[in-house]
Amino acid sequence: MSEPRINDRIRVPEVRLVGPNGEQVGIVAIRKALDLAREADLDLVEVAPQAKPPVVKLMDYGKFKYESAQKAREARKNQANTALKEIRFRLKIDEHDYETKKGHVCRFLNGGDKVKVMIMFRGREQSRPEMGIKLLNRLAEDVSDLGTVESAPRVDGRNMVMVIAPVRSKADAKAESRKASRGAKGASAEVKSRREREAQAKAEKRDAEADA
């Protein structure tokens, strides 16, 4: 992406000006737009050079670049931390095994990881792909509160695969886990404190009875 034109680098007679909060100022002469930028101590940045006339916006370009870099860094961090877990099903899976494997899928999604669900066909089962699609669609529906289908069921050799992505990021999952952990520690400390107070009260009661 090319560097946007800023301030005196904008070489057109008129521009469509957008204010710092997104408000539409309208079509003005470039000189007036530059004067407004200087008065507000902001940059005049060309955001849509192909428009007729070009669209420019009043902004703090240094702050904008910094915030954009921060968002990009956070996005890369979340992407790097997201793992692709794999769960394998048999086409003729019994209900107990299905619930067990569904629990694993829920745990992975709840932790912010993607899940690659694979159905392994045996022998003549390969002639019944609709049964695999039915099973995968059932799973997707059962975990829809935690994940969404990123890659629809498709045949991959003798298998059928589907990818489910979590509805929340890895960072959000970790933050919630830390919050829950702090809450549990706080509750544990409260229980311990209450027990200590009760033990102290009993000891004071025994001492009082002994003195009597």
Image (spheres, grey):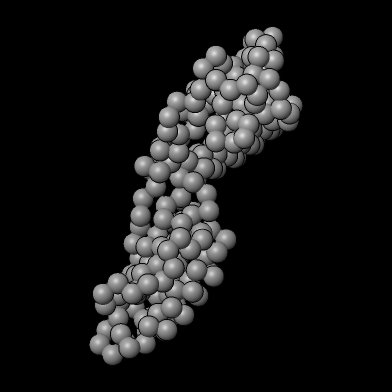
Residue drawn 36% across the image and 50% down it: 83
Front in this rendered view, residue 46 or 54: 54
Out of 14 and 8, give the one closest to the viewer.
14
Direction front: furthest residue: 13
Q: Which image quadrant is residue 14 in?
A: top right
Closer-to-camera residue (80/143):
80
The residue sitting at 25% across, 87% down in the picture is 123
Whether residue 209 sits left or right of residue 187 in the image: it is: right
| 129 in relation to 60, above or below | below
Residue 109 is left or right of residue 179, and the answer is left
Picture residue at 67% right of the left edge, 11% below the top? 35
Where is residue 191, by image quadrant? top right
- Residue 94 x %, y %: 41, 82
Q: Nearer the viewer, residue 14 or 201?
A: 14
Q: Residue 3, how many percent across, how many down?
A: 45, 25
Is 72 situated left or right of 193 in this image?
left
> Quick check: 185 above or below 108?
above
Q: Is residue 147 above or below residue 69?
A: below
Q: Is residue 101 visible?
A: no
Q: Locate the C terminus by quadrant.
A: top right
Residue 183 in picture, x, y percent from top left: 57, 39
- Number of marks in the rendered image: 0
Q: x and y percent of residue 56 in the render?
A: 61, 26
Taking the spot 37% from the left edge, 72% from the top edge, the residue there is 154
Depicted 134 relative to depicted 70: above or below: below
Residue 179 in view: yes
Quarter holding the N terminus? top left
The image quarter containing residue 50 is top right
